[in-house]
Image: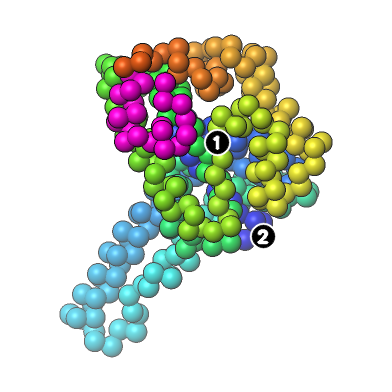
Amino acid sequence: MAYQPFFVTGAPKSGTTWLGKLLDAHPEISCKGEACIHFFGKALIAAANSYNELLERRLANVSASNAFSPMKEAEVMALYRAFVEARMALIVDPAKTGLRFVGEKDPLHGPNFPVLKKLFPEAKYLNIIRDGRGVLVSAWHHNKRQNHPDFRHATFDRFLDDTAQNWSGMVRRSRATGPDLGAGYLELRYEALVADTGPTFQRVLAHLGAEASDATVQACVEAASFERLTKGRSQGQEDASSFFRKGDPTDWRNHMSAAQVARFETQSGGLIRELGYPVN
């Protein structure tokens, strides 16, 4: 690949979209999402398995001299990588003459870190984590805004249980395998990115190896600010019809009772406390 690849991940509603926009505002970086590469990868592996079964049947029943042996994992991975590179080539911004880094974001990257490591051992990985209670409230409003048929009769408590379990599962899997990526892996917190955007983003750029001067960081922060993304709303000013609804990491306190906070901690297996977030 002509550019340094990187992948952004985090449980849904953890700030991956905003982080991607911050990165895409940088003159050396193109970052878009989501290519849904893992959907293709699973289909590719299934197709390779079916193909190998066909070859084995041919070898046994048609010709014992068939020169085409079953596909090995390395061949499948090479095809998979070629697909991802072709997808990522679509987001290369020709206007960025100094482009050096191309990235793609997807919540499913985290659970699939071992596969990505095989595909792109040279890549950098960014894993953003958000307090699961903030994820819950953001996802609740997001689904209400979309008015999906499967969500119309959902209750908040049932949604709380599902979200706590899904969030904790994704976070635990990514944190368990992320360190295996070595120096290419960086974990950051959504809350830190909101509270201290410039320095936190500067750390992200340093991890990638991108130019990280104060002027460049400030330009990116301004380009991807809540006010810019919402066309004038201040952070904390709510618009329930917008993808960027409120931008307040503590908004869960306005929507959850003490019993629901305790329930979330239980349903997530104690992950709130493990991550160092206040439990109430």
In which quadrant of the rendered view does residue 73 lie?
A: bottom left
The tally of labels here is 2
Q: Position of residue 216 (x, y in %)?
A: 78, 38
Q: Is residue 278 at least partly visible in the picture? A: yes
Element on which disc 2 rests: loop
- The disc, 1 or 2, on the residue closer to the chain's N-terminal end is 2
The answer to which of 214 and 241 lies nearer the viewer is 214
> At label 2, which amino acid type do we have?
Ala
Colour logic: rainbow
Q: Is residue 269 magenta?
A: yes
Residue identifier under label 2: 2
Q: Residues within 10 Å of mark 2 (few under 14, many from 20)?
A: few
* Picture residue at 33% right of the left edge, 19% below the top: 260
Q: Is residue 105 visible?
A: no
Q: Secondary structure at mark 1?
A: strand
Q: Residue furthest bottom?
A: 65
Look at 49% across and 17% down and name the residue there: 251
Amino acid on which disc 1 is placed: Arg
Q: Is residue 187 above or below residue 218?
A: below
Q: Which residue is mark 1?
A: 189
Tell me which segment is drawn in magenta. 260-280
Q: Mark number for residue 235?
A: none
Nearer the observer: mark 1 or 2; the answer is 1
Mark 1 nearby-residue class (10 Å; few <14, some 14–19, many ≥20): some
Dividing the image into 4 quarters, which one contains the C terminus?
A: top left
Q: Quadrant of the N terminus?
A: bottom right
In the figure, residue 238 lies in which quadrant?
A: top right
Residue under the point 70% across and 40% down = 202
Residue 35 on image: x %, y %:
50, 44
Query: Image height check: is 185 above or below 262?
Result: below
